[in-house]
Amino acid sequence: MSTHVRAFASVETPVDRAAVPGFVESDFNPMVHDVASACLAGQDFDGDRLAVVLASLMGDATTTDLASTLLAAGQVHNPLLFMQATANSILGYVSREFDITGPLISLSSTDHELFAVADLVLTDPDLDAVLTISVELSPNPRTAQAYRMLGASPPERDVATAFLLERATEDM
Amino acid sequence: MADDVVVTGFGAHTAFGRGARPIREGVFAGVPAFAPTTRFDTTPYRTPMAAAAPGQPVLRDVLFDCANDAVSMAGLRSGDDAAVLLGTAGDWTRITGFWRTGEAGELADSVPAHLADALADRLGLCGVRLAFTNACVASSTAIIHGWRLISAGHVATAVCAGTYLVEEENFAKFDSGRAFSHDGAVRPFSGDRSGLLLGDGTAVVVLESAESAKRRGVRALARMTGWGVASDAYHIAKPHPRGRGVVAATRQALRRAGVTGVDYVNAHGTGTPINDSAETTGLRSVLGSSIAVSSTKSTTGHMLEGSGAVEFVISVLALTDGVIPPTAGFQLADPLCDLDYVTDGPREADLARVLTLNAAFGGMNTAILLERA
């Protein structure tokens, strides 16, 4: 099966961007929202035939480590951090905005694995398209240490990229 | 049509212990595992209760033990070509340790992808390795992806897993979100339900093409004949009140399996007021009002990323044993929850088909349909 890129978007920090209501502190969620919206806005698609696959090796470490440092300091958690503790939340926000009722999948992985998963998901005859989102934040002290232990290179700045992929016409 | 996908092995850890026997003696007997946890100081929180196994188990060790049980049962060997698909958020205790004491020795285990790699390396399996991180549907998503890989002919075998152990990071978050039960019990579908409690849950299942299992002479424990995945497109943290995603995922699973009904549903059933009524509404609209439904989270607690895999194992045991595990803690009828919730203890039943449901933040829903082998 071959795929066709219908839309593409990328964003890096620092950038001026609107906050996403209900999401605080971390750039992870606004960046996901930015690239997803840029790919989906104005596109004609059937929400129950669209999947979203998000990949991030380290995930939203800003939220994770802010919550953990509050815990270490004996401070009360901010309930908003609970609400945005997983990438599910921003995917749920995007799904509501664009009425996407197909599969929402998130991975801890590299881009190579992301596209392999997207390709396989798109073999499902119930689906026409898949939105891939890769997002990685620049390292904090914990993720910098984890990157070193994994022998991987961290990104120099926050970066998010999205592709709206659809089955090529000859496959439809 | 794609080759059948069958289940040829499993391993599990819950608060009741390791393996199938503790699940039969705890979950299937309807005995809740909740007690004040001693893994960390619970003084700052509204409840000390969780379903945690004794001591301070290490997530990686528990996962490896369950995986060894599963691959031994399935007769897999080091060097075999099999995918390893893990639902996890990583080992949270490593993050806590880093920020509390600067301890970084096993910090790599806080990265889900690393745990999936470590698991595959430990088992010596050659094949794609992936970590799924979508919270409470992470391991059901891993299992469904295993089905996809096998059905597409990419692999003959997929080792699919999910893991979560009770720890303080998520305990604090759920406490801050006021999601915990007020009375130390999880009472799914009961009129006095007030929330969830967390629980240990790790399970590893081996999925395999029926042809491969037959060729290897391995017994199929159950067949995975259908699945569905759908999102509510409704709210980041609340389920759709009429169970939009539950309905869509269940219908997909039935259609893929080519059936119109099931004999038992292992529900998501968190014991939160809003989930259980929404799930009931969705299930009733697809499967009717006489369907037998239970929530085993009433005994295990909510196992987050481990839920889908552990409840998959519970559903396999229900099929093989011919027993529906009960909903524990039910005290009071709720007009919004009007199905048969199996509240009077375990029920013997001639089960041919079982559906297991999971849901997660973001409005994600999965349904997996298992049939007797």
Image (tube, coloured by chain):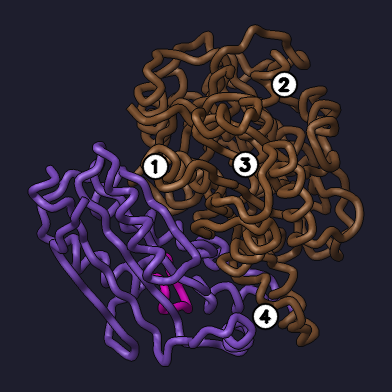
Dot 3: within a 10 Å radius of its alpha carbon, few (fewer than 14), some, or many (20 or more) residues?
A: many
Disc sitting over residue A18 in the figure: none
Residue highlighted by disc 1: B153
User: Quick one: which chain is purple?
Assistant: A
Q: Position of residue B296 (x, y in %)?
A: 69, 31
Mark 4 vs mark 3, CA separation in Å: 31 Å
A84 on left or right of B23: left
Mark 3 vs mark 2, CA separation in Å: 19 Å
Q: Amino acid at mark 4?
A: Thr
Tell me the chain of label 2.
B
Magenta range is A22-29
Mark 1 vs mark 3, CA separation in Å: 23 Å
- Give the residue displayed 62% in from the left and 55% down from the top: B79
* Mark 1 and mark 3 on one chain: yes
Dot 1: within a 10 Å radius of its alpha carbon, few (fewer than 14), some, or many (20 or more) residues?
A: few
Q: Amino acid at mark 3?
A: Ala
Residue A25 part of the magenta segment? yes
Q: Nearer the viewer, mark 1 or mark 2?
A: 1
Residue highlighted by disc 4: A69
Q: Secondary structure at mark 2?
A: loop
Label 1 or label 3, whichever comes before in sequence order: 1
Q: Nearer the viewer, mark 1 or mark 3?
A: 1
Residue A156 seen in this snapshot? yes
